[in-house]
Amino acid sequence: MNIIGPDALVFGVENVKDCEQYLIDYGLDSVGDGRFEALDGTSIVVLPKDDASLPPALPTGNMLRKTIYGVADQNTLDAIAGELGTDREVKVLDDGSLVANDDLGFTLGFQITVRKAIDLPAETVNAPGAAPQRPVNVAAADPDAAPKPRSLSHVVYFVPDVAKGEAFYTQRLGFRCTDRFTNAGPFLRPAGTQDHHTLFMIQTPPFLQGCEHFTFHMGGPSEVMQAGTRFVEKGYESFWGPGRHIFGSNWFWYFNSPFGCHVEYDADMDIHDDEWTAREALSSEDTSQIFLFQHRDKWFPSGGPPPAKE
Amino acid sequence: MVPQWWSTTGERITKQFNVIVLTNSFKKLCHIDDLKDGTALGFDPLAKGQDTLFVVRQGPVLRSYKNDCPHWPGSPMAWRKNAYLTSDGAHIACHGHGARFDIESGLCISGPCDGQSLQSLELKVDESGYLYVRLEHLSGKTDI
């Protein structure tokens, strides 16, 4: 099934204004009706938690109400409706999109993808031994740059039964496991993308079920650092990072949020096809990252006499 | 003048104590008037680059805790600078995974660390109303 990845995540929140300001400061664009878009049109939707249009909340009260997948075409939508319709209700909304629950109780949507083609350069690097990626006299570092999230990358769920969840997404929707943390869960890639994962599940007690984090792809590691630094400077609370994961190789920087989950910037994820053999490891400090930095206030050393004390 | 009820978080202190102890073992955070009722403030007294503790005021209650959720030690709790409380101001919240804590006791009353407690820090208020925290309690293996 040609599922490309998440087009949108819909949240029902307590404090709409805080959540909206958070997403604007994160770098998404407000386009109305509670929708905040990345450059390719993928989005986060923020609605009051009692909004009548929202699907019911999980029993845990987690604020994620719907994960909407973008698919390639109507044939894929028809195939999903046929497959899931064998054992559950599949609603067709006025806009032609589908709604159905997964086997864990998450509400899913499926629509012909809204993703727009974007034509932007990736971060470039010059290194001895390789042809220059940037032309001569082009400076990379721009203190005034305002990097923007490009595309909704992935969502991570806390789930009470990771085997049940994996079986649903692999057997019913054609996702493949790219790598696995034995004591946590699988990284899953749908057939319509080569990204290492668009979904990762972590086994937890049932009362934690919900969204653990979501993230958007940035243009490269420097953009993760620069956007993350800008976010810290606006007063937001760094949770983990910046650093670089091993499974997926993506650079990461996670922040706390008013959505009851973490929100990440990521960049430079590995891509895979069906020839890839999934790796497996116990999740730990050593297997989850090559290195981890921690933000500190700007500082610099210099020569000469010590600076005058304040 | 410091209201009498501030003594719930630490006895009024003598000038001698002020000179000897506060300057060595404690770090000045702010004036109590900086801390509005029903709010919290985060502080980074060791210049770590991230707030390592917060102080919360709720009516007569004044408490300080490490910015470190017992669910996953090392996890900071606010979602934005000084945003440590639930939107109704009734509880301390960890905005990582939604744990809620009683403001007065630091006990987790719902969430993944139900029954565990925040690490309380000793506060003192001097005669001028300045708030101090005991530094030694800030260090430890879950230091952020």
Image: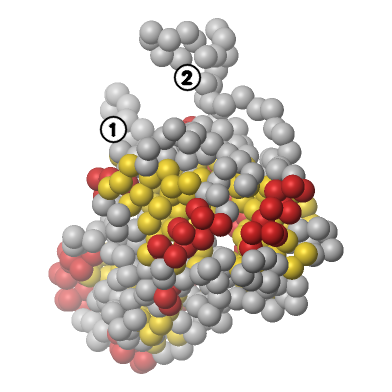
Task: Tell me which corner region of the image, top left, top right, bottom left or bottom right, holds residue A10.
Answer: bottom right
Q: Residues within 10 Å of mark 1 (few under 14, many from 20)?
A: few
> Which residue is at 35% across, 62% downward?
B75
SS state under label 1: loop
Residue matched to label 2: A125
Position of residue A253 relative to residue B109, above or below, is above
Q: Please tell me which residue lies in front, A206 or B79.
A: A206
> Which quadrant does the C terminus of chain B fall into?
bottom left
Pointer 1 with pointer 2, Cβ within 8 A? no
Kindly report which numbered mark, 1 or 2, lies closer to the viewer in this rendering.
Answer: 2
How far from the left and from the top, in percent, is residue B115?
Answer: 30, 84
How far from the left and from the top, in percent, is residue B88?
Answer: 56, 82
Position of residue A8 relative to residue B86, above or below, is above
Which chain hosts label 2?
A
Residue B54 visible in rendering: no
Which chain hosts label 1?
A
Position of residue A200 relative to residue A248, above or below, is below
> Which residue is at 57% across, 10% downward?
A135
Q: Which mark is residue A306?
A: 1
> Which badge, 1 or 2, comes first in the chain's sequence?
2
Are discs 1 and 2 located on one and the same chain?
yes
How far from the left and from the top, in percent, is residue A76?
Answer: 70, 48
> Which residue is at 48% across, 75% downward?
B85
Three-letter amino acid code of the residue under disc 2: Val
Position of residue A199 relative to residue A207, above or below, is above
Q: Residues within 10 Å of mark 2 (few under 14, many from 20)?
A: few
> Which quadrant does the N terminus of chain B fall into?
bottom left
Q: Please tell me which residue lies in front, A221 or B132.
A: A221
